[in-house]
Image: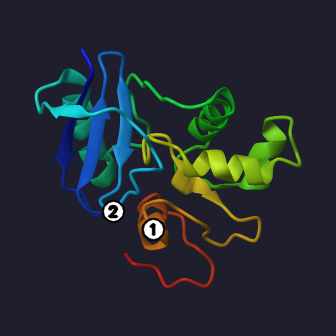
Amino acid sequence: MGLVKTSMPSPVGVLKLVASDVGLVAVLWPEDDPKRVRLEEAREDDSHVVLRKAVAQLEEYFAGKRREFELPLDARGTEFQKLVWEQLLAIPYGETRSYGELAARLGKPTASRAVGAANGRNPLSIVVPCHRVIGTSGALTGFAGGLETKRVLLELEGISIPGQKPLF
């Protein structure tokens, strides 16, 4: 059937959601670089069941009423990227991990840069919580949605970043 898409307003801007008949394929940022997540053309379909569920669950997340997503996912990437994204799903709401910690969990303790690159290609922002990955020093590091968006998401989950004035 191909891909379908919809858009939804959120506290971090208008998000673009993309789905297949298998599951959610992408949650993209307002200013997302089209080269970061390469997908075939999608047609507009606000009524697609996966997209409706994704919008509802993201609204609950932003309202502070949802900590985990219950959506079928159809992540598209390399085998290594998918392994990294599985590790992201294991990071509990309200907690962070460093790139080095994720690399160690994968049994590749020297692969923190490769983990960072795979994290940066995560097509399922927020749902697969790449925003919960920070630098070893505790500093906010690269994020496709922008560091201010990353900070907003972390603070929404009750995580304060040292040296940063809370937004809420």
Residue 37: image x %, image y %? 45, 44
Instruction: Identify residue type, mark 2.
Output: Glu
- Judge depth for marks 2 and 1 and give the one in front: 2
Look at mark 2 in the image and give the residue it sits on.
31
Tell me the element at label 2.
loop
Residue visible at 19% across and 49% down in the picture: 8
State the SS at label 1. Answer: loop
Residue at x 70%, y 65% (from the top left corner): 135
Res. 12 image quadrant? bottom left
Residue 85 numbered tag: none
140 relative position to 115: left or right: left
Which residue carries the number 1 mark?
A: 146
In the displayed structure, does residue 83 sit left or right of residue 122?
A: right
Left or right position of 109 against 6: right
Mark 2 or mark 1, earlier in chain: 2
Q: Total number of numbered labels?
A: 2
Q: In this view, does 161 lie above or below 80?
A: below
Q: Residues within 10 Å of mark 2 (few under 14, many from 20)?
A: few
Percent across and percent down for residue 106 are: 79, 35
- Considering depth in this image, is 55 or 38 the residue closer to the camera? 38
State yes or no: discs 2 and 1 in contact (Cβ < 8 Å). yes
**Which quadrant is home to the N terminus?**
top left
Q: Residue at x 27, y 52 (%)?
A: 15
Residue 80 at what x, y percent from top left?
69, 32
Asked where in the image residue 160 lies, by quadrant, the reply is bottom right
- Seen in the picture, residue 26 relative to 62 is either above or below; the reply is above
Residue displayed at 68% across by 53% down: 116
Q: Which amino acid type is marked by label 1?
A: Gly
Q: Quadrant of the C terminus?
A: bottom left
